[in-house]
Amino acid sequence: MVERVGAAPGRRRSDQAHRAILQATREVLEEVGYRNMTIEAIATRAGVGKKTIYRWWPSKAAVALEALVTSHDAYVPFPDTGSLAGDLLAYFEQAFPILRGKSGTVLSGLAAEAQLDPTFAHEFQQTFLVPRKAELIELLRRDQQRGELSPDTNLDVLADLIYGAKWYRLLLYPAPLDDTFAREIVALISRLKYS
């Protein structure tokens, strides 16, 4: 069972209600997006009271984050194709379509919420961003051990650059997250092998 993110101190008494709330949250997000999602709509869909939701999550951002994190549709694995270029292209091929869809809209809303709420920002970072960055660093480390990146490459900074490009296009810059962009990122990173 996934531990609740941003959970209020109240004890969860019903796993069935918990699952219903997360499913209702996913459905409401799919229908109206993060901005228009309300706790009232989630409660009605899940067949619970608003107080139940607020007892387990401190905000709509927290329940949306847990719904996203526990959704199989939003998780992108980091494959091992045998090469740095293949690993990164395979990752982008799976990640970019998700970001162009409803999950990207939800992530944009959560990122905006994180700018306004420092407590939620910490939850968002620890629950969503930090684990995914750690997985990317492991992918890069594996490719570094195969000799595809220079031994002195700062993998932490490289992961920030990769994610920075992705998040910049998702949140701020009106250019597509597409195969061309993925190939351009991979081509630039491939030049870091040995200079």
Image (cartoon, rainbow, N blue to C red):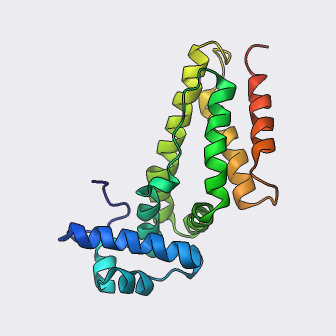
Q: Give the residue at x 63% y 36%.
A: 90
Question: How many labels sit on residues?
Answer: 0
Residue in the foreground of this view, choosing between 128 and 28 = 28
Q: Give the residue at x 81% y 37%.
A: 184
Q: Give the residue at x 52% y 80%.
A: 37
Residue 155 falls left or right of residue 118: right
Residue 23 falls left or right of residue 183: left
For the C terminus, give its image quadrant.
top right
Q: Report whether residue 14 is seen.
A: yes
Residue in the foreground of this view, choosing between 181 and 168 = 181
Residue 153, above or below 115: above
Q: Report whether residue 8 is seen.
A: no
Q: Quadrant of residue 40?
A: bottom left
Residue in the foreground of this view, choosing between 72 and 67 = 72
Q: Give the residue at x 47% y 43%.
A: 131
Residue 111 lies, in percent from the top left, at: 59, 62
Residue 57, above or below 51: above
Residue 24 lies, in percent from the top left, at: 40, 75
Q: Quadrant of residue 155?
A: top right
Residue in the foreground of this view, choosing between 125 and 180 = 180
Which residue lies most toward the left here? Answer: 13
Residue 19 lies, in percent from the top left, at: 31, 67
Residue 30, above or below 190: below
Residue 73 falls left or right of residue 93: left
Residue 83, above or below 170: above
Residue 168 falls left or right of residue 8: right
Q: Quadrant of residue 91?
A: top right
Residue 144 lies, in percent from the top left, at: 60, 18
